[in-house]
Amino acid sequence: MPGKPKRILILGGTSDARELASRLNADEEFFPVTSLAGLTSTPEPLDGETRSGGFGGVAGLHRFIEDHAIAAVVDASHPFAAQISANAATACEETEVPCLRLERPAWEAQEGDDWTIVPDVRAAAFTIPPEARAFVTVGRQEIGHFFSRDDIFVLARMIERPDIDVPAWAELMLARPPFTLQQEKTLMVARDIGVLVTKNSGGDATYAKVAAARELGLPVIMVARPVKAGVASARDVDGLIALLEEGTA
Ligand code: NAP
């Protein structure tokens, strides 16, 4: 008789987390509990159990792991979500529960790319030359850095409306990836874009804009990923499940 499934806490907010929840839900050895930050009003459906909202720092996450008999934590949060990853590493150390990271590889510049790599979103906003027409895809939380540049045009694309006002020199575009190469090229040409600003998110769903910039000969301001805690990690769901089987055996 198979034993009780092991409860795996997935720190979500990414398509990889969603895929992992679906795979674990179909596996009788595991039961996925996905946690979302609660910032998106209409998150896509997830298999298994879900919860939403912050835990209340390391102490809250520590309590959650104990109260819900979590056998392992998979940090499948976005590469740019630095705080929750740090909290997970610490809470797992404290509770002696394995912490694994699922992180798709970063994009790498290839021939024909013209990238300026910057350390964070704020630096990206300062790097845009005056008078430029910028296509900015850094999400809604940090878009304010660009809205305060009244000397440029900003095409700001994001999934949900930001909490701040959109200034007259910016255009807001609400859309959910994936986008095709042709869609991205058409958009960039139609808005007469001169520079693309993006986080180095990695993965396929949002890569078309980078390929489009290359094909159109446009420069890219690429925000580098923050450095995260050194926990055992996998680049895809198959690799993560193999780690999980070893780590919880
Ligand atoms: P963050 O800076 O790392 O986290 C800020 C706080 O939000 C955390 O301390 C935690 O609150 C709460 N939080 C974050 N992720 C959570 C989760 N999965 N479950 C429960 N609480 C969570 O995160 P962020 O950059 O604001 O990102 C928030 C969420 O959006 C993440 O789940 C991330 O995967 C997703 N996301 C982020 C980006 C990005 O560019 N940053 C892009 C796409 C998706 P407490 O301390 O109270 O626990």
Image: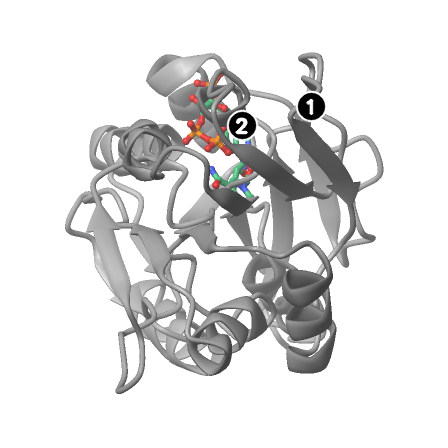
Q: Point out the residue furthest to the bottom here.
A: 111
Residue in front for this viewpoint, 41 or 31: 41
Residue 84 shown left or right of residue 183 in the figure: left
Residue 78 vertical position relative to residue 163 in the rendered view, above or below: below
Q: Amino acid at mark 2?
A: Ile
Residue at numbered disc 1: 162
Dots 1 and 2: beta carbons under 8 Å?
A: yes
- Is 232 on the left-hand or right-hand side of 18? left
Q: How many numbered marks are there?
A: 2
Local SS, label 1: loop
Q: Amino acid at mark 1?
A: Pro
Q: Which of the 4 quarters of the picture holds residue 245?
A: bottom left
- How crowded pointer 2 is (Cα within 10 Å; few <14, some 14-19, many 20+) is rated as many
Q: On the rendered structure, is 227 left or right of 184? A: left
Residue drawn at x 70%, y 68% as measured from the top left = 178
* Residue 214 quadrant: bottom left
Residue sitting farthest toward the front: 131
**In the image, is residue 150 above or below residue 136?**
above
| Any part of residue 212 in sight | yes
Residue occupying the point 64% across, 68% down = 19
Visible in this render: residue 4? no
Q: Position of residue 103 (x, y in %)?
A: 37, 62
Tag shown at residue 183? none
Residue at 50 percent across and 41 percent down: it is 138
The first of marks 1 and 2 along the sequence is 2
Name the residue that disc number 2 marks.
143
- Picture coordinates of residue 11 (x, y %)? 51, 44
Q: What's the residue at 45%, 74% (across, down)?
A: 241
Split into 4 quadrants, where in the image is the C terminus?
bottom left
Note whether 90 is above or below 1 in the view shown: above
Camera-side residue: 188 or 99?
188
